[in-house]
Amino acid sequence: MSKHEHGYMPALRFDWLTPLYDPVIRWTMREALFKPRLVQQANIQPGHRVLDLGCGTATLTILIKQTHPETHVVGLDGDPKVLALARAKVAKAGVTVTLDQGMAFELPYPNHMFDRVLTSLLLHHLTKDNKRRTLSEVFRVLRPGGELHVADFGKPHNAVMAAVSLIVRWLEEAGDNMKGLLPVLIREAGF
């Protein structure tokens, strides 16, 4: 299925590839390096409420809870198939987190609910309009002084990444990211 059939882009673009998401990301994206750095950068404090937006299979959700057990961690994703994988991983990890199904651009949370929103490899899945809607929603659900922390594709800075970006652009809605527009869209949302 494509995003047009169910309103979101499945992990790796196609439903049938969803079970392969974790090994593909682990081997191609250096996930073991960038996700811990994202969590460290967020400076999460005891008692914080943290949203992992576009949690996918919950790798980041679990990492946040394991490194900050005194926080309340929520993972949100629009894909029920990937959330089934996430629930199994959470159970295996033995952590207590909340996993919700919902769209990033229509967050099912009240205003000012979270101290931190972290998102990893979500925004390149979204159209420019849905990136804007998502960032506005994130701004709405963050408490005053709350922070958004993003790990996603950006403008390539060398020939290798430029070549990789051609593949990513074909697979995803990543053109805005590859043009370097993500920081602009984040600022436009009020950050």
Image (cartoon, rainbow, N blue to C red):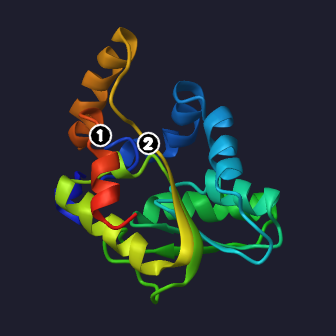
Which residue position holds label 1?
A: 177
Give, as a three-letter code, the residue at label 2: Asp
Q: Secondary structure at mark 1?
A: helix
Say if residue 8 shows up in the picture.
Answer: no
Say if residue 17 shows up in the picture.
Answer: yes
How far is disc 1 from disc 2 in space, using C-alphas? Answer: 8 Å
Give, as a three-letter code, the residue at label 1: Asn
Q: Residue at x 56, y 71 (%)?
A: 146
Q: Residue at x 19, y 54 (%)?
A: 128
Q: Looking at the rendering, in which quadrant would you find the C terminus?
A: bottom left
Of residue 26 and residue 120, the one placed in the foreground of this image is 120
Q: Residue at x 46, y 85 (%)?
A: 109
Which residue position holds label 2?
A: 152
> Viewed as shown, does residue 147 lie left or right of 134?
right
Using the image, determine if residue 45 lies above or below residue 131.
below
Measured as percent of width and height from the top left, residue 2 is found at 22, 51
Using the image, determine if residue 91 lies above or below residue 42.
below
Label 2, residues with CA under 10 Å away: few <14, some 14-19, many ≥20:
some
